[in-house]
Image: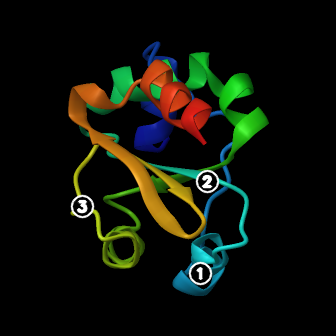
Amino acid sequence: MSFLDIFKSSGGPSISDKWARFENKDQAEPIFDSNARPALIYKHSFACSVCTYSLLSLERNMEQIMEKADVYFIDVRAERPLSNYVAEKSGVQHQSPQAIVLYKGQAFWHGSHGAVRGEAVMEALDEL
């Protein structure tokens, strides 16, 4: 049984299958294209309780978020090089939990720790 299975069985949030996941930097590159649809990148650590609350908040707002943006999930512990790549490309220093809204290939909004809430992401997307 993996840590994720234990986490799920303990009543913690499961990760919606609506999140896209990158396997490498090449797959992430297109979201930095200025013609790309707005994107939400969420950086998560399964070892962090604050991340749990952030994920729950984002999941509660997932349908509304997905109407306005593509959504991407990065496990910062398992995918640290990818997380660092996103930090470099976006100009937003790595933290977790962290949410970055990209618009026209640039970081339009970002938040970390307690600021990562579904409502805050929706407010940013509504500004676009």
118 left or right of 64?
Answer: left
Quarter holding residue 117: top left
Q: Quadrant of the C terminus?
A: top right
Mark pair 3, 2: CA separation: 17 Å
**Residue 65: image tag:** none
**Whether residue 27 is visible:** yes
Question: Do callouts 1 and 3 mark residues in contact (Cβ within 8 Å)?
Answer: no
Q: Nearer the viewer, mark 3 or mark 2?
A: 2
Label 3: few (<14), some (14–19) or many (≥20) C-alpha neighbours in 10 Å: some
Taking the view exactly as shown, the residue that stands out farthest to the right is 67
Question: Do callouts 2 and 1 mark residues in contact (Cβ within 8 Å)?
Answer: no
Q: Amino acid at mark 3?
A: His
Could you tell me which residue is drawn at 43 percent across and 16 percent down? Answer: 10
9 left or right of 27?
Answer: left
**Mark 2 / mark 1, whichever is N-terminal:** 1
Q: Identify the residue position indicated by label 2 in the image.
A: 39
Could you tell me which residue is drawn at 60 percent across and 68 percent down? Answer: 22
Mark pair 1, 3: CA separation: 17 Å
Q: Identify the residue position indicated by label 3 in the image.
A: 94
**Residue 29: image tag:** 1
User: In this rendering, is residue 94 above or below 2?
Assistant: below
Mark pair 2, 1: CA separation: 12 Å
